[in-house]
Amino acid sequence: MTAPGQRTSAPAPAPATGGRHAFLVASGILLSRIAGLVRQRVFAHYFGQSDAGDAFNAAFKIPNFLQNLFGEGVLSASFIPVYSGLLARGEEAEARRVAGVVGSLLALVTSVLVLAGVMLTPVLVDAIAPGFDGAKRDLTIDIVRVLFPGTGLLVLSAWCLGILNSHRRFFVSYTAPVLWSVAMIAAMVVLGGRRDEAGLAIALAWASIAGALLQFAVQVPLVLRLTGGVRPSFDLASTGARTVVRNFVPVFVGRGVVQISSYVDSILASFLPSGAVTALANAQTLYTLPVSLFGMAVSASELPAMSSVVGEKDEVAARLRSRLDAGLRRIAFFIVPSAMGFIALGDVIAAALFQTGRFGQGDAIWVWGILAGSSVGLLASTLGRLYASTYYALHDTRTPLRYAVIRVLLTTSLGYLCSIPLPLALGIDPKWGVAGLSASAGIAGWIEFLLLRRTLHGRIGAVGMPGLYLASLWGGAALAAALAWSVKLTAGHGLSPIPLAAVVLGPYGVCYFGVTSLLGVHESRALVAKFVARVTRRG
């Protein structure tokens, strides 16, 4: 990020194709996230922040560990750069062989691990939720054993996503998870009034498997059509397949390290008062929404494009800098107001999405505290995704791994201090330790981001956003938050959560776009101009 004296309006528009592809990814993610939010709202209605809710959320993390290890993150780093490069060079037959080998290896390895996971479930539950005991622990074990077989389907869905993304078919791959959420929503609505919480949690786990099958099945026909048919194979003779496997190992370890950070949060939360695990999961649902919509959308769309860049070293570096600069601006423009909104208006957001049934106003305040802590590192963790994608495009998977290890070590040590000893020393309710967890993870995220940024600058040259540009974004978000707070205090009394959110968040968004447009922010002016043009045409 360069000196503050630079102009805010310095043109850095994204390449046209990058912006269009990012829009497709964001649109798909938005639909899947909306379905996910509806699923979480229905979950909150039937489970609140109860022991059964804790059991399901803790149980879901265990098989989800495999999905995250072998799924989208690892494939994005190891498979997509190789596969996209082969397509860019016109080597379609080799690309098809690589896809077949990678799919076969994923199916084999995950099958073995799923079987082992089902057999070792009690040990895994004790590792991830050592604070659970009695009926709560037994329910968690039962849920994990049901969920594990669906993990393989989700991993294969991620393999489909890797192929579709490389062919620039982003929308289908990112909307497929809608079916997974729909299956779970249907199970809760149909069975919610007929079973107790424990029985409903088990039924929900079975619905998750059905949804995973639907998510995989909807992508397969397009994958087969784009590739001309993929044949299962374990032939590692091809250079491309060996490159994927070689890159897979450090990325696999790196993803494992990152997942450990998430598991540390769950382990520590299991020692906090009842409902802490579910409160953390609810906050993470909201926190990851802008990360997915903007960070993942830009990173996922840029990775195949960056991986397809060819030319001399200096030419490649220049094109990477151009794409990275544009991507960073697009991400920051949306992430900054998201972070400010979580800090200032998290109670309004949490209540609008979750306050129903057993989820009350006090629960919304609890989630708000966790959200505010998460916002500390929201910008860093989201920008870090794009930096990591640039490393992967350069076929460097080890540098992100090193810094991920540092992040996890910091998250673990700071997380323990901020979640258990600090609330005790301050004499506050222990349940607020979970907010300390999220804030400590944000601090660690900033350190990882700065390390990624410094090293990459040494390889391709300096990139980043002008200080005045960032000041404009934060200033616009702060003014918008002040306006929203005044609306909340003057016009929000007596309103139920959803109307209150409409009354408060609407002015917040309008004010942010208005202020940043007046300050000369390119992205804001472009969006406002498009909106005005559409309104004018309709009028």
Image: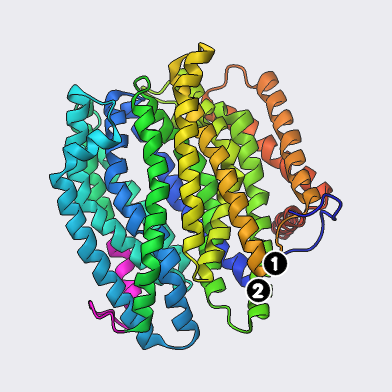
Answer yes or no: is residue 376 visible.
yes
- Image quarter of the C terminus: bottom right
Frontmost residue, 88 versus 289: 88
Residue located beneath label 2 in the image: 317
Is residue 453 one of those drawn in magenta?
A: no
> Which segment is the magenta one?
213-237
The amino acid type of the residue labelled 1 equals Gly
Q: Position of residue 247 (x, y in %)?
A: 40, 68
Q: Residue at x 26, y 53 (%)?
A: 151
> Residue lying farthest top?
427
**Residue 444 placement: quadrant:** top right
136 shown above or below 443:
above
Frontmost residue, 76 versus 49: 76
Q: Residues within 10 Å of mark 1 (few under 14, many from 20)?
A: some
Which disc is residue 461 wearing?
1
Which disc is residue 448 wearing?
none
Frontmost residue, 363 versus 537: 363
User: SS class of the residue under badge 1?
Assistant: loop
Q: Position of residue 48 (x, y in %)?
A: 35, 25
Q: Residue at x 47, y 66 (%)?
A: 170
The amino acid type of the residue labelled 2 equals Ala
Question: Along the horizontal axis of the image, is 192 left or right of 361?
Answer: left
Question: Along the horizontal axis of the image, is 247 left or right of 459?
Answer: left
Q: CA distance from mark 1 to mark 2?
A: 7 Å
Q: Are marks 1 and 2 in contact (CB under 8 Å)?
A: yes
255 shown above or below 484:
below
Is residue 222 one of those drawn in magenta?
A: yes
Q: Position of residue 442 (x, y in %)?
A: 55, 39
